[in-house]
């Protein structure tokens, strides 16, 4: 009875088109913002901030960018790691080579570099799609690996790069709390902008291309503009996440930090979380980030109940096996992802306790 809409009437178009039309959703989101901004930074330990929350926020941002391209526009991409690498190294070069370059403009300029890179490797989407497009975006990963390993100018003639002295409006970004708040603020702003973009004409064009590009072209949608704009927006967000991953989470990195593994992880996140859903990116990122940590704690305890001991290598292998099995199970039981399960649960609450 708590999640009902009785008496919630809309009297203006603005009220009818708001992101959270149900009052209970607005209350929950307000409490979540208070918890995230006002409680978590000061009540959570530094280890949890650095090891779990900060990576979760950055990966959620990258998953949001991947979901725009794969979930909303239907263009399969396996080059997310390359876009993150271009965003990180682009931001690094602007930050190091331009005297007095602030942190936020450096990250945005690095994201713009990733946008150009994404549009370049998105051009094949005008002619190919499906598995063939996945292979062409995979070429971006090979090219990025070669570029940052062989062209020493991008890495400032160093096998690994590092960033120090980060500040935002005069406040140093050194402690775990400041890094967490920076990532959370950027994620909240980008998610809000992406949500409004997807609800507008541009988002509807992307979804029309995803559903049937030939029919979309017949009704006047330009496939070239829609596909390349999706690649541009997605690459920008992923590049921004790459800059935060290198600057805030790693601090020092090398090209191996943006390998194939991160591209596949991001794709699994949006598939498990739910394609074509902003919430799905967050749920998928939470699943991918938290499940290995939970398994690493639960497996030794479970083995101890049976009088067995399991080595660290065994735990690592068991994590991969269980993780893969759960992915297959989710794809079979609910192919639309965790976001669909959440939507079904909300629909049940709107009718409970009545059967219809």
Image (spheres, helix red, strand yellow):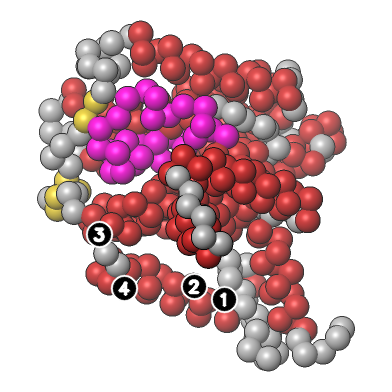
Q: CA distance from mark 3 to mark 4?
A: 13 Å
Mark 1–mark 2 contact, CB under 8 Å? Answer: yes
Residue 324: quadrant of the picture? top right
Identify the secondary structure beneath mark 3. helix
Tag 2 secondary structure: helix
Q: Which residue is mark 3?
A: 46
Q: Position of residue 200 (x, y in %)?
A: 62, 52
Name the residue furthest front.
307
Q: Residue at x 38, y 73 (%)?
A: 35
Cα–Cα span, label 3 and label 2 = 25 Å
Chief secondary structure of the magenta portion: helix
Single out the mark in the foreground, 3 or 2: 3
Question: Which span is picked out in magenta?
Answer: 235-264
Whole-angstrom CA distance, mark 1 to mark 4, is 20 Å
Q: Are marks 1 and 4 in contact (CB under 8 Å)?
A: no
- CA neighbours of label 4 inside 10 A, class few (<14), some (14 to 19), many (20+): few
Identify the residue shown where x is 31% and y is 73%.
Answer: 39
Q: Residue at x 43, y 29 (%)?
A: 258
Viewport quadrant of the C terminus: bottom right
Residue occupying image coordinates x 28% and y 43% = 248
Q: Which mark is residue 39?
A: 4
Residue 229, how many percent across, how many down?
A: 58, 33
- Which quadrant of the view contains residue 71? top right
Label 1, label 3: how far apart the Cα atoms are: 30 Å
225 w.r.t. 73: above or below: above
Numbered mark located on residue 29 in the image = 2
**CA separation in Å, label 1 and label 2:** 6 Å
Viewer-proximal residue among 253 and 183:
253
């Amino acid at each position: 009875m708590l999640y009902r809409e009785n008496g919630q009437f809309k009297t203006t178009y603005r009220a009818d088109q708001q992101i959270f039309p149900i009052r209970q959703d607005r209350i929950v989101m307000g409490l979540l913002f208070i918890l995230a901004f006002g409680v978590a930074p000061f009540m959570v330990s530094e280890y949890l901030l650095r090891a779990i929350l900060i990576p979760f926020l950055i990966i959620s941002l990258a998953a949001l960018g991947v979901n725009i391209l794969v979930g909303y526009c239907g263009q399969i991409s396996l080059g997310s790691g390359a876009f993150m690498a271009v965003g990180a190294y682009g931001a690094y070069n602007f930050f190091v080579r331009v005297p007095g370059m602030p942190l936020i403009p450096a990250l945005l300029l690095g994201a713009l570099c990733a946008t150009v890179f994404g549009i370049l490797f998105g051009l094949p989407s005008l002619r190919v799609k499906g598995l063939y497009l996945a292979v062409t975006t995979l070429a971006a990963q090979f090219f990025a690996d070669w570029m940052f390993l062989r062209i020493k100018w991008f890495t400032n003639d160093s096998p690994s790069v590092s960033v120090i002295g980060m500040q935002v409006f005069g406040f140093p970004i050194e402690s775990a709390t400041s890094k967490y708040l920076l990532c959370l603020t950027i994620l909240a702003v980008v998610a809000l902008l992406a949500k409004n973009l997807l609800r507008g004409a541009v988002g509807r064009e992307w979804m029309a291309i995803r559903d049937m590009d030939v029919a979309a072209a017949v009704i006047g949608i330009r496939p070239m503009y829609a596909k390349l704009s999706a690649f541009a927006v997605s690459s920008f967000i992923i590049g921004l996440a790459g800059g935060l991953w290198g600057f805030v989470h790693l601090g020092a990195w090398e090209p191996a930090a943006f390998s194939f593994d991160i591209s596949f992880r991001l794709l699994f996140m949006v598939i498990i979380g739910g394609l074509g859903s902003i919430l799905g990116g967050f749920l998928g990122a939470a699943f991918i980030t938290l499940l290995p940590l939970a398994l690493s704690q639960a497996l030794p305890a479970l083995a101890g109940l049976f009088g067995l001991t399991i080595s660290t290598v065994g735990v690592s292998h068991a994590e991969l096996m269980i993780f893969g099995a759960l992915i297959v199970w989710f794809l079979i039981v609910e192919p639309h992802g965790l976001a669909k399960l959440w939507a079904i649960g909300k629909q049940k609450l709107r009718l409970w306790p009545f059967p219809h």
